[in-house]
């Protein structure tokens, strides 16, 4: 009997080992889905194989590998949507693009055939049409490769790099960069890079010889995303007013585009008015999504039928593939008497 039990335990161990092996197999959907962070982000791109830039640009590589650009092919939500599309190739161009400069910054980038796991890789944005020169903001000379300063990387003047892929409405995606272009946000001093790639100071290169490269001002490739509650909070400006026995909360768009920008992404607001003793007087809710969205440069009103001492506002963010809505906001406003 005892021997039998040991045998059973042994079988279980083998089965477990086989299960682990099977999980390490090549179905990225199941393996990545297991590794979603609470807010819906996959942890980071695992394999950097095939990306030679990272050998000398390790710090930037580390930023980039945690961005949705690095994960654009492995993303479980994308892979799931792809299953139901007949002409799958029509979905590849922006998620695994050939270098864009050679293509002329078209809004229909061509897909590449190799190293797809790298998603939107470094050369997609930086390789010049000549196939050897690296375009960048400064054109710093190096013997590693030719470099050239390009106005494409001057974000105060030009947003072409980002607009190229973000202005098309396709699949579950809303081309929100169109809002940015149509309402001429550059004239207000805004840029995609300015909000989504935070200013940072660090050496931009390293090598095997241990050369000390200077610390330079640059932009983090760790893109700011609405999956990050701190960043999502910045999307709105709030104002509270008391009028005719009602409390009116105005929710103003603070981005250069509409909110949100993806089907099934919803943002819920709940406002409650409390009296002096903290008891709830009245409450009201508002949800924004792809149809009832918050347009650029506009505001929506959340009206609570009643007034009191304070208004407490809570926000939750719901996105496809994320199990539970993520709280991103809790704020208390004192009401005028
Ligand atoms: C013109 C470029 C372009 C093409 C072509 C394209 N996408 Fe995308 N895709 C994007 C951009 C940009 C985003 C990011 C949108 C966002 O987060 O607001 C995205 C994001 C997604 C996401 C959301 C991932 C997530 O949860 O954040 C899915 C799913 C997706 N695409 C599926 C598709 C499918 C299916 C097709 C083909 C029908 C397709 N895409 C073709 C540009 C494109
Ligand atoms: C052998 C090492 C090495 C490799 C590999 C390498 N680089 Fe560089 N790169 C450098 C060095 C060194 C600099 C200059 C750093 C400095 O002076 O601070 C540089 C500068 C740059 C710049 C800055 C240009 C500007 O405007 O100032 C860009 C962009 C760039 N590299 C992109 C890439 C990309 C993309 C790849 C991969 C295709 C790559 N590099 C591969 C070493 C390398
Ligand atoms: C080659 C096409 C392409 C270019 C160029 C591009 N993007 Fe993207 N971007 C995408 C795709 C595709 C995704 C979605 C990846 C996914 O979730 O599967 C994305 C995701 C994002 C996200 C994350 C959205 C989310 O839901 O978390 C932000 C923010 C973003 N891009 C901003 C930018 C900015 C800023 C630039 C310019 C510096 C830029 N993008 C250039 C294709 C592109
Ligand atoms: C003033 C700051 C600001 C500017 C300018 C800006 N964004 Fe955003 N962006 C945000 C904020 C805040 C969010 C989070 C709210 C949301 O999801 O829309 C966001 C969200 C996004 C998302 C995710 C949208 C979604 O709901 O799936 C993408 C993609 C994006 N921005 C791309 C861009 C691109 C491309 C540009 C330039 C054409 C740009 N942004 C300009 C602040 C900005
Ligand atoms: C979606 C496009 C995109 C991708 C992908 C991308 N970059 Fe960049 N990169 C930019 C933009 C835009 C800037 C300049 C931001 C600015 O200053 O306006 C930049 C700046 C740089 C710089 C100058 C220093 C700095 O921090 O601003 C270097 C070096 C660089 N990138 C290397 C890389 C490497 C290496 C990769 C891959 C790991 C990569 N980039 C991936 C768009 C991209």
Image (cartoon, rainbow, N blue to C red):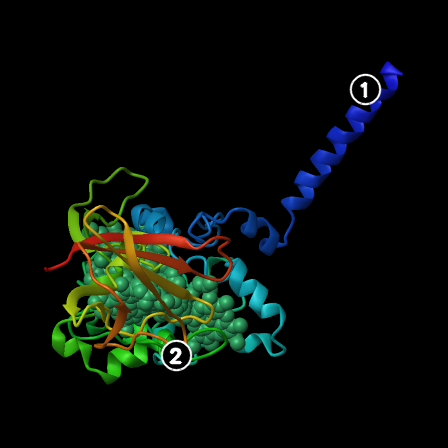
Say whether residue 38 is left or right of residue 277.
right
Element type at mark 2? helix
Residue 35: image location, x then y, percent: 52, 46
Q: Is residue 168 above or below residue 71?
A: below
Q: Quadrant of the N terminus?
A: top right
Q: In the rendered image, which quarter is residue 7 located in?
A: top right
The answer to which of 170 and 165 lies nearer the viewer is 170
In the picture of the structure, the residue carrying the numbered disc 1 is 6
In the picture of the structure, the residue carrying the numbered disc 2 is 103
**Quadrant of picture, ligand 4:** bottom left
The residue lying at 73 percent from left, 29 percent from top is 13
Q: In the rendered image, which quarter is residue 10 located in?
A: top right
Q: Quadrant of the C terminus?
A: bottom left
Q: CA distance from mark 2 to mark 1?
A: 63 Å
Q: In the rendered image, which quarter is residue 124 located in?
A: bottom left
The numbered disc on residue 265 is none
Residue 179: image location, x then y, percent: 28, 80
Q: Which residue ends up furthest to the left in the rendered image? A: 337
Q: Marks 2 and 1: CB-CB under 8 Å?
A: no
The residue lying at 25 percent from left, 64 percent from top is 235
The answer to which of 89 and 271 lies nearer the viewer is 271
Residue 317: image location, x then y, percent: 39, 59
Q: Which residue ends up furthest to the top in the rendered image? A: 2
Residue 218 visible in the picture: yes
Q: Is residue 292 above or below residue 139?
A: below
Residue 93 visible in the picture: no
Within 10 angstroms of label 2, few (less than 14), some, or many (20 or more) residues?
A: some
Residue 210: image location, x then y, percent: 27, 37
Within 10 angstroms of label 1, few (less than 14), some, or many (20 or more) residues?
A: few
Q: Point out the frontmost of discs 2 and 1.
A: 1
The residue lying at 19 percent from left, 73 percent from top is 151
Q: Is mark 2 within 8 Å of ligand 3?
A: no
């Amino acid at each position: 009997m005892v021997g039998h039990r040991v045998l059973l335990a042994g079988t279980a161990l083998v089965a477990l080992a086989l299960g682990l092996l099977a999980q390490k197999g090549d179905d990225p959907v199941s393996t990545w889905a297991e590794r979603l962070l609470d807010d819906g982000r996959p942890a980071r791109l695992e394999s950097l194989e095939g990306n030679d830039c990272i050998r000398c640009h390790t710090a930037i590589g580390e930023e980039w590998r945690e961005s949705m650009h690095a994960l654009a092919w492995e993303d479980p939500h994308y892979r799931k949507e792809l299953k139901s599309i007949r002409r799958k190739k029509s979905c590849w161009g922006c998620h695994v693009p050939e270098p864009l400069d050679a293509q002329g910054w078209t809004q229909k980038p061509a897909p590449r055939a190799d190293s797809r796991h790298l998603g939107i890789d470094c050369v997609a944005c930086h390789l010049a049409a000549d196939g050897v020169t690296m375009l960048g903001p400064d054109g710093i000379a190096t013997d590693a490769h030719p470099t050239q300063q390009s106005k494409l990387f001057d974000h105060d003047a030009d947003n072409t790099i980002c607009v190229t892929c973000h202005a098309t409405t396709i699949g579950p995606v809303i081309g929100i960069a169109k809002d940015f272009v149509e309402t001429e946000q550059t004239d207000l001093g805004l840029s995609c890079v300015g909000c989504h790639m935070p200013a940072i100071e660090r050496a931009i290169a390293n090598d095997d010889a241990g050369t000390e490269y200077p610390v330079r001002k640059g932009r983090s490739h760790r893109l700011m995303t609405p999956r990050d509650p701190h960043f999502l909070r910045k999307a709105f400006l709030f104002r509270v007013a008391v009028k005719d026995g009602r409390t009116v909360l105005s929710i103003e768009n603070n981005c250069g585009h509409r909110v949100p920008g993806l089907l099934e992404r919803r943002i819920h607001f709940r406002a409650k008015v409390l009296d002096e003793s903290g008891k709830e007087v009245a409450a009201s809710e508002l949800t924004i999504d792809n149809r009832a969205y918050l347009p650029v440069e506009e505001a929506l009103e959340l009206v609570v039928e009643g007034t009191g001492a304070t208004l407490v506002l809570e926000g939750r963010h719901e996105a496809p593939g994320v199990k539970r809505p993520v709280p991103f906001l809790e704020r208390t406003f004192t009401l005028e008497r």
